[in-house]
Image (cartoon, rainbow, N blue to C red):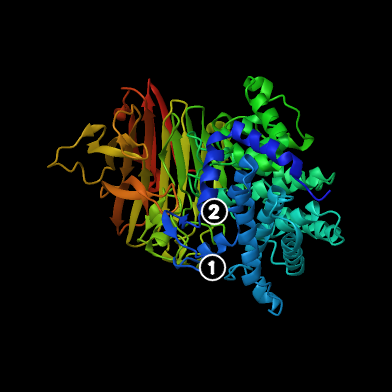
């Protein structure tokens, strides 16, 4: 009875299936496991680090406390376990036990420490509640991988099981706040212990505590529209996978969470599916990384929805659900999309999509503040969200834009959590697709996980999905006497209009910044659709207009000059507007950067207020924007109005009030 995922006699069979389904991942796991067996240095963010023999679990030459936390989560046991299941080589079981017993010998459970210290979410060392929960989760998987091996028996096995009990005691005794996703990770370890070792007298209490707190977590942490309250796609995905895994574990023992829990998980799945870019990566708003796939496989398996499947990451779910579930989902995915969408599913999954995000545009998550516009060819995700806490970025009214399967205007990602100038830059307003005022962030930056006050607040002004229009404003510059309002339209003809108005008094400097993967740009100042010669400036009172055309999409290595994808822009502003193209960076992978270009409209004015109007259009061919169709005039109360005169039909774009 004390096996939740698979029994020892199934181990070899599952190992063969894993190799059949995922040969590359099996080979990689064996290679990694061999490194551990040979006591070779571990690789951390591209750096070789020798932990010693026996391992010193507190050794940290990096200066980054995330390193100590990371190695004490024991995630490397998964590669040792996979290698053992695939090969049956006892050396992998022996090495895993060596690591676990060495850790038990050197990292005693703290007992005479004040609870307030033990529950501090940034507590250093291996017994932070987060590491305790995640380590216990990995040890339970290790138990399934190695139980009844030659190494795991007698006194050694008893010491391991006693430490499992100690971990569960710690997690059930010291309870931290349920307002952040750490608490989910605390409880997934406790729930796993309670559901695996069902013959232990303590297990019923562990299950009860864990399931009750997980119900509280999901109600407190998730907004009414299904978005995790940290407003960060990466942590939303992590939380979703954890909530689903907990439901999967409970189901294996004939238990179930409440209907409310199931409804919220379904809503979370919907949001997660809509944060997928056209290129299959994740929109990396706030502390997220575009290289971390939007792993919806746990939900795809739970709901039997192949439309959510990401096959490249499916191996991560194998040891939780087993080969039969994997085979069933892959078989359903091989059917036509129409047939796949008819798969049997849990009743509460009515809101969960079975298709890609661009087929469900426009969309709105009003409680969170994320909105989507576009069609099957273009996709724009607009950030009208609040800061979202420590993982937030100063990016109010920013956006991500994809066209024809490529991410064109992007969020920069995260790069690092360590406190340094790069951490500050990647969280800054300057690094995002919005307007920077007087060189200051919308919310004051204090340090890597802390923002100052006042915190920028965003208000929705208008949302008209049938017209594909949204308008919002933020007050992050209220202390400087500035309010930023942005309206955005998507036209049936494929163009985008972005209208920024900055209401203010006195002199200010405004930087309208757009970050793009197109690295080759031609720019030209224009008046009434015509080019302006280098020695001309145009009228002193008519709006300025700049034309820009970009190509050379960066493909991760170099600018792909052969790509047919181009983008044209018209940028209008007051007469004193300047326009240039700068270098910048995005971080797709942690601690790695790749180039971007920034299209910047620069304006310093003593007048009251400022404005920018941008027209964007992508193209895969030789078709060009008809710039003469677009013009800006100054309307009532001195407010700019954009006009499109096409085929005898006049369309006017004014800022919603």
Q: Is residue 326 above or below residue 42?
A: above
Q: Is residue 97 left or right of residue 312?
A: right
Of residues 597 and 280, the one drawn nearer to the viewer in this rendering:
280
Q: Is residue 241 above or below residue 324?
A: below
- Quarter of image, res 270: top right
Q: What is the x, y in percent for residue 549?
A: 29, 34
Q: Is residue 475 left or right of residue 613?
A: right
Find residue 657 and name its label.
none
Q: What is the x, y in percent for residue 385?
A: 55, 51
Q: Is residue 352 above or below residue 118?
A: above
Q: What is the x, y in percent for residue 437?
A: 38, 58
Q: What residue is rendered at 27% in x and 38% in y?
A: 521
Of residues 158 and 470, the one drawn nearer to the viewer in this rendering:
158
Q: What residue is rendered at 62% in x and 40% in y?
A: 86
Real-space Cα separation, disc 2 to disc 1, in angstroms:
16 Å
Q: Secondary structure at mark 1?
A: loop
Label 2 crowd (10 A; few <14 / some 14-19 / many >=20): some
Q: What residue is rendered at 78% in x and 48% in y?
A: 3
Find residue 37 and name its label.
2
- Quarter of image, res 509: bottom left
Q: What residue is rendered at 65% in x and 64% in y?
A: 101
Question: In the image, which is nearer the foreground, mark 2 or mark 1?
Answer: 2
> Label 1, on which residue?
56
Of residues 95 and 261, the one drawn nearer to the viewer in this rendering:
95
């Amino acid at each position: 009875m004390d096996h939740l995922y698979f029994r020892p006699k199934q181990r070899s069979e599952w190992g063969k299936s894993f190799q059949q389904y995922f040969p590359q991942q099996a080979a990689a796991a064996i290679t990694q496991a061999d490194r551990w067996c040979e006591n070779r240095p571990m690789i951390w963010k591209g750096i070789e680090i020798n932990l010693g023999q026996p391992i010193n679990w507190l050794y940290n030459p990096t200066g980054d406390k995330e390193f100590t936390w990371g190695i004490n989560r024991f995630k490397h046991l998964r590669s040792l376990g996979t290698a053992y299941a695939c090969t049956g080589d006892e050396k992998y079981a022996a090495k895993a036990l060596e690591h676990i017993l060495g850790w038990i010998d050197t990292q005693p459970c703290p007992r005479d420490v004040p609870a307030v210290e033990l529950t501090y979410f940034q507590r250093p060392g291996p017994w932070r509640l987060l590491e305790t929960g995640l380590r216990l989760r990995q040890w339970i998987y290790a138990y399934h991988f190695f139980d009844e091996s030659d190494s795991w028996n007698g006194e050694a096995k008893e010491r391991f099981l006693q430490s499992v009990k100690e971990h569960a005691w710690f997690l059930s005794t010291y309870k931290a706040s349920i307002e952040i996703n750490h608490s989910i990770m605390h409880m997934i370890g406790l729930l796993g212990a309670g559901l695996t070792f069902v013959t232990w007298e303590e297990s019923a209490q562990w299950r009860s505590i864990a399931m009750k707190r997980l119900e509280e977590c999901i109600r407190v942490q998730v907004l009414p529209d299904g978005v995790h309250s940290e407003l960060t796609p990466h942590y939303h995905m992590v939380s979703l996978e954890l909530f689903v895994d907990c439901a999967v574990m409970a189901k294996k023992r004939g238990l179930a969470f409440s209907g409310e829990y199931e409804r919220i998980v379904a809503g979370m799945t919907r949001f997660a599916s809509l944060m997928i870019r056209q290129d299959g990566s994740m929109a990396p708003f706030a502390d997220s990384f575009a290289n971390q796939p939007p792993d919806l496989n746990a939900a795809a398996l739970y709901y039997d929805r192949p439309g959510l499947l990401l096959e490249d990451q499916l191996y991560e779910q194998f040891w939780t659900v087993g080969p039969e579930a994997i085979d069933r989902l892959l078989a359903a995915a091989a059917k036509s999309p129409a047939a796949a969408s008819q798969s049997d599913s849990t009743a509460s999954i009515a809101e969960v999509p079975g298709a890609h995000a661009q087929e469900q545009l426009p969309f709105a998550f009003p409680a969170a503040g994320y909105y989507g516009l576009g069609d099957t060819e273009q996709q724009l995700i607009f950030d009208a969200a609040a800061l979202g806490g420590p993982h937030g970025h100063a990016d109010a009214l920013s956006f991500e834009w994809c066209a024809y399967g490529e991410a064109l205007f992007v969020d920069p990602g995260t790069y690092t959590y360590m406190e340094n100038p790069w951490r500050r830059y990647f969280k800054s307003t300057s690094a995002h697709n919005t307007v920077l005022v007087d060189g200051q962030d919308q919310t004051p930056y204090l340090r890597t996980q802390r923002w100052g006050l006042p915190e920028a607040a965003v208000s929705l002004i208008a949302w008209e999905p049938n017209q594909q229009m949204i308008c919002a404003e933020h007050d992050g510059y209220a202390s400087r006497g500035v309010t930023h309002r942005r309206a955005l339209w998507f036209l049936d003809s494929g163009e985008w209009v972005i209208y920024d108005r900055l209401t203010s008094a006195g002199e200010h400097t405004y930087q309208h910044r757009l970050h793009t993967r197109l690295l080759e740009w031609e720019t030209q100042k224009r008046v009434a659709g015509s080019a302006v010669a280098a020695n001309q400036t145009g009228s002193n009172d008519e709006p300025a207009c700049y034309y820009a055309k970009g190509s050379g999409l960066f493909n991760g290595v170099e600018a792909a000059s052969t790509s047919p994808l181009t983008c044209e822009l018209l940028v209008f502003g007051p007469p004193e507007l300047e326009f240039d193209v700068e270098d910048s960076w995005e971080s797709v992978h942690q601690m790695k950067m790749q180039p971007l270009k920034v299209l910047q409209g620069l304006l310093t004015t003593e007048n009251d207020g400022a404005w920018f109007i941008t027209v964007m259009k992508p193209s895969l061919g030789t078709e060009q924007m008809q710039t003469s169709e677009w013009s800006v005039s100054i309307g009532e109360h001195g407010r700019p109005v954009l006009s499109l005169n096409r085929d005898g039909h006049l369309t006017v774009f004014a800022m919603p009030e």
